[in-house]
Amino acid sequence: MQAEQKNILKYIANEVRKHIIEGTFNAKSGHPGGSLSIAEVITYLYMCKIRIDKNNFDNPNRDRFVLSKGHCVPAVYGILAEMGIFPKEDIKTLRQIGSKLQGHPSINFPCIDMASGSLGQGFSSAVGMAIAGKLDNKQYNVYAVLGDGELQEGIVWEAAMLASHRNLDNLIIIVDNNGLQIDGPIDKVCSPYPIDEKFKAFGWNVLTCDGHDFDELEKIFSEIDKFSEQNFEDKTNQNYSNSTKPTVVIIKTVKGKDVSFMENNVDWHGAAPNKEQYDIAMSDLNLISENLEKHKDLSQKAQEFATKISYNLKETVNINNSTSGKLVQFDLQITDKPKATRESYGESLRDFAEFYPDLVVLDADLSAATKTNIFKKKYPERHINCGIAEQNLMGVAAGLAAAGKIPFASSFAMFATGRAYEIIRNSIGYTKLNVKIGATHAGISVGEDGASHQCNEDIALMRTIPNMVIINPCDDIETKLAVRVALDYNGAVYMRFGRFASAQINKPDYKFELGKGVTLKDGDDITIISTGLMVKQALLASEILSKKGVNARVINIHTIKPLDTTLIKKAASETKKLVTVEEHSIIGGLGSAVIEAISENPVPVKRIGINDVYGYSGNAADLLKAFGLTSESIVNTVLDFAGNT
């Protein structure tokens, strides 16, 4: 690297450090130590490697960057300010109410490709972005920075395993090895060493360097560039075998670098300087600036260099390029026989894929059970098996969506919502990404597998996530139409499917409308509100009740969020009593949603469902009977509730 360029980069990195101190001082909180340790590598990446287009920050051909150690975002804000992406004065608003500079990365900020903060999740999303690049045969790279303590997270190794398995040579991970985490030295807390040997064992190229030395950074990343240039000609979106390995660069750094009292001091992991400390820190950094400014016009040259960084990238594909609307006349293949909605789900993915080229399907070693193998047989290159790694499954789905794909992440409801809840919340819900979650084997009717697999809490969990749509279809036709609607909906959707065969209820001309319940039978005495597998039981119960002199209205609520509150309030007003029926816990599910909807003008509500207990093994029919989820049990409950026993 030429001396002048190196001095310019040193100057910019020092300015980044000043921004870190300025931001955390004004915020009176933050993470200066780890932010200071990555100033050089962040400067080098944005100044020399990451291709962005200032005229179109969302250009699909741009390189991607993920700060997986999201608490160190002050360093990223610092370099973006130097580049003129936003006014430097805004650094003082870091972490303050109303500021765009959130305490951890937000996807709504320019040049930030993924929200992060909960450690390990950013790595997983970066893998998804790299897979998207492979599928689209695009020549972009994905860069991600992790902390060394972050390597203690299990999702990191789930992501590392999948990246190597798929030979993602467009993925470059940088591990900031500053040796300290919140509770002390990483080798004393829970040692991740030897980091290099671990990544080698996982099938990665491993490079190491001094993370504060621009000459070494230049040498390392030039070597990576040679790998990419050499192998790109051999890449196709169907064949991964010609690609080389993903690369990890382990950079040795000093936590708190260049601030005298912060260097190698664990106390500055998550503490902000007071005024006296701020003055000392800025004095340390200003002295470095003064020494660098001995070179003629360096300050001006650094500013000009940083603000001119931009690439004129040809835009070839629009992000989220789906063919919405082509399926209006699509001929659904339907059957009159009972059919599990999980099977309808798999068939829908296969049948709709032709019309939605960005549709990809993910699974976690359960494709035969979730029925995504139906899709895989026709579109193997668009089916991504993440192995037994549900957290990574959701993180990869988020990365794919951030890169313009429409991912359907598929697993059992227990694993999809239970094990992976936080990833769904932070990487999918918070980011408002276009991820669809296909959760099969929901409810007590999973049967013989017992309580560990009978997820009766999934709707409750998903209802708590802002921006999450929840669909629980009742039969084959409704499932296929729900998948179609989910494809056209730009946002996160949770779809609940069963293992137990569902009777066919709807006719071929049925119209599915998101957020709109369906009155299947009119009645004036009481309203039975049902969802999913219980819709058929509610209809059968209404027939028995009519013979007993009770005229029950039956409503199918296929969309639990957003809920059709208008229809529910109308039923409450007209029949005065409501009964909810669901194959789910009575806590947090349909029953709770209905009660919330009518809370301002309440009427009596009886909830039928799983009564705050775990399930147990048995065949599905016997379990449904044991838990009171049959038409006969519904009849008895309604008669008792209506006062007609």
Image (spheres, rainbow, N blue to C red):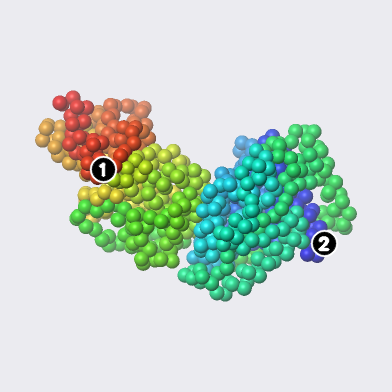
Q: Residue at x 18, y 31 (%)?
A: 636
Helix, strand or loop at mark 1: loop
Q: Residue at x 36, y 33 (%)?
A: 587
Tell me where residue 319 appears, x and y as whole percent. Answer: 51, 59
For the residues bearing labels 1 and 2, Cβ distance under 8 angstroms = no
Q: Is residue 224 above or below residue 340?
A: below
Of the numbered discs in the image, which one, if any, rests on residue 444?
none
Q: Residue at x 41, y 56 (%)?
A: 365
Left or right: 297 with respect to 44?
A: right
Residue 183 appears in the picture as rendered: yes
Tell me where residue 333 appears, x and y as whole percent. Answer: 26, 61
Of callouts 1 and 2, which one flags the residue occurring earlier in the amino acid sequence? Answer: 2
Q: Residue at x 75, y 54 (%)?
A: 212
Residue bearing mark 2: 4
Residue bearing mark 1: 618
Q: Residue most toward the bottom?
A: 233
Crowding at dot 2, Cα within 10 Å, few <14 / some 14-19 / many 20+, comes out as: some
Task: Check disc 1 and give the amino acid type.
Answer: Gly
Corner quadrant of residue 539:
top left
Quarter of the image where the C terminus is located: top left
Residues under labels 1 and 2: Cα distance? 74 Å
Tell me where residue 296 appears, x and y as whole percent. Answer: 88, 58
Q: Is residue 540 above or below residue 434?
A: above
